[in-house]
């Protein structure tokens, strides 16, 4: 993946965050229980915030935040893929979300490794870090759900 400019790379990331927002809104709409619906609506809102942060970075309104290491429980790495469809239960939705976040993390890390501009690398590392945080939250939620059953 090649980007002609910093702005082109940011625009790509903005598009990815918009897609993630729509993904979580669609997943939320498939949930039967209000609490489960709210979890995915919260994640949709976070993806929207990521988009806003990217646009602020692009427009020079904020500096890139520092990136801290996020723990990976690797729960999602060992679960069978689940398709998001109507009637999906909360446990299955968590699996879908973990896999989605892992893919987003990997994509942003791969892009960070392909670009040479330091600011651009740091932007994609920041995005990868955000996706790692989401994956961790889903893994913790999944682990807690399994422990209850």
Image: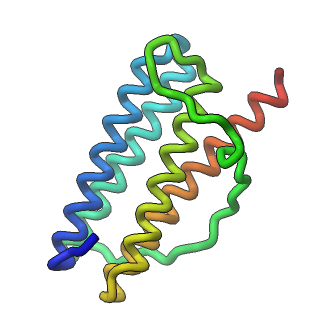
Residue 96 point in image, percent of width and height: 53, 35
Q: Nearer the viewer, residue 93 or 64?
A: 93
On screen, residue 67 versus residue 72, left or right, reads left
On screen, residue 117 versus residue 88, left or right, reads left
- Res 89 → quadrant: top right
Q: Nearer the viewer, residue 50 or 20?
A: 20
Residue 135 point in image, percent of width and height: 58, 49
Q: Residue at x 16, y 79 (%)?
A: 5
Q: Residue at x 53, y 17 (%)?
A: 88
Q: Residue at x 52, y 74 (%)?
A: 67
- Res 28 → quadrant: top left
Judge whether 37 appears above or below 116 on screen.
above
Work out which quarter of the rendered image holds the N terminus and state it. bottom left
Q: Residue at x 44, y 19 (%)?
A: 85
Residue 103 point in image, percent of width and height: 48, 52
Q: Nearer the viewer, residue 56 or 128?
A: 128
């Amino acid at each position: 993946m090649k980007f002609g400019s910093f702005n082109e790379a940011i625009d790509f990331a903005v598009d990815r965050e918009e897609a993630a927002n729509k993904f979580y809104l669609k997943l939320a709409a498939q949930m039967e229980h209000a609490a489960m619906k709210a979890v995915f609506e919260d994640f949709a809102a976070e993806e929207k915030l990521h988009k806003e942060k990217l646009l602020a970075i692009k427009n020079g309104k904020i500096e890139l935040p520092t990136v801290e290491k996020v723990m990976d429980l690797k729960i999602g790495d060992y679960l069978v893929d689940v398709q998001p469809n109507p009637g999906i239960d909360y446990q299955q939705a968590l699996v879908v979300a973990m896999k989605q976040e892992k893919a987003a993390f990997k994509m942003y890390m791969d892009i960070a490794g392909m670009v040479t501009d330091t600011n651009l690398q740091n932007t994609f590392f920041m995005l990868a870090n955000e996706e790692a945080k989401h994956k961790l939250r889903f893994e913790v939620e999944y682990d807690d759900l399994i422990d209850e059953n």
